[in-house]
Image (spheres, helix red, strand yellow):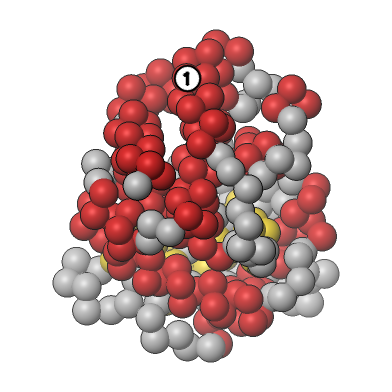
Amino acid sequence: MAVPSSDVLEAFGIVDDPIPLPEGRGICYRAGDIILKPSDNNEEAEWISSLTESLFKRQPSVYRVSCPKEVLGGSTQRFVYSNWTAWSVISGKTASKDAFEAILVASHELHTDLATLRPKKPPFLSQIENRWMEADRVTWDEKRLEDVGNVNADVLALIQPFLQRLWQMKKPILEGMKDQLIHGDMTGNVLFDHNRETPPGIIDITPYWRPAQFAEAIVVADGLVWHSRGRELVDVYGTGNMRLQLLVRALYWRCLTFAIDSDVEWVREHLPHANFNMALTIVTNLLEI
């Protein structure tokens, strides 16, 4: 695991020693009131930092965002130095089982702001080829699964029954939904203070170019699969045909990510706890109404 060097600390004006954080992928560090995050793609990291700065300056009342820290001394990039970014600490802990409705409210407000601030698709999105983006392209019929690299045949065989049922549920979305910038991984990246007196904090914006309601569908899918939420959460999200079709796609996408560039040890540990059966039963029953 990479550790931020003294040059990186100096570039961001950080005087405290960096301490590794266990959250997320275990690759970030905290130094005083600053979070240091490594960059997988400097163009993307610079773009997201600039976007988040714009969100921060809007002073939204329904959600909070962290403020990116600028590089000191006239670097070629404002927010990225030697593959690292720095962010102000935002208080709170990840969502509990009862917080999903609040995440949906925050998502609606965030995506209204994103549509205004960044109305055009960022060019780097088309170049990203990680497991989540590749699964997204397959889900939205932009790429065949056979053309995706690093598919683990054993894992795919395990999840194939779920994928097949979801694919059969998938129908065209006729409402002519508009794609926009979305945060495609809100569930684990919305932080709540213990007393809920401050708005939820949104971190680590993960960009996709899909309908805003798809971000909400992913949150609901995660609630069903990982957090034992039931029909009541889908009712809050919405049970119209368009929203159910987005939920089908969100479940398919989340399931398919297991099989691409698989961390087999992680899959063996976590897949048994993913309740796709219950989620599929709920959606199937709603589609039959």
Local SS, label 1? helix
x, y percent for residue 204: 52, 59
Q: Residue at x 82, y 69 (%)?
A: 76
With 122 as the anchor, is 210 left or right in this view?
left
Task: Please name whichever residue, 43 or 156, is drawn nearer the observer in this view of the structure.
Answer: 156
Residue 76 can be seen, yes or no:
yes
Q: Quadrant of the N terminus?
A: top right
- Residue at 51 percent across and 49 percent down: it is 245
At label 1, the amino acid type is Pro
The x, y position of residue 228, in whole percent, is 24, 41
In the image, what residue occupies the spot 53% across and 13% down? Answer: 157
Which residue ends up furthest to the left in the rendered image? 195
Relative to 269, say whether 131 is above or below: below
Query: Measuring 43% from the left and 59% from the top, which residue is drawn there?
Result: 240
Expressed as whole percent of the image width and height from the top left, the position of residue 66 reads 48, 72
Give the x, y percent position of residue 232. 24, 54
Q: Is residue 75 above or below residue 279?
A: below
Q: Which residue is mark 1?
A: 161
Residues 36 and 190: in front is 190
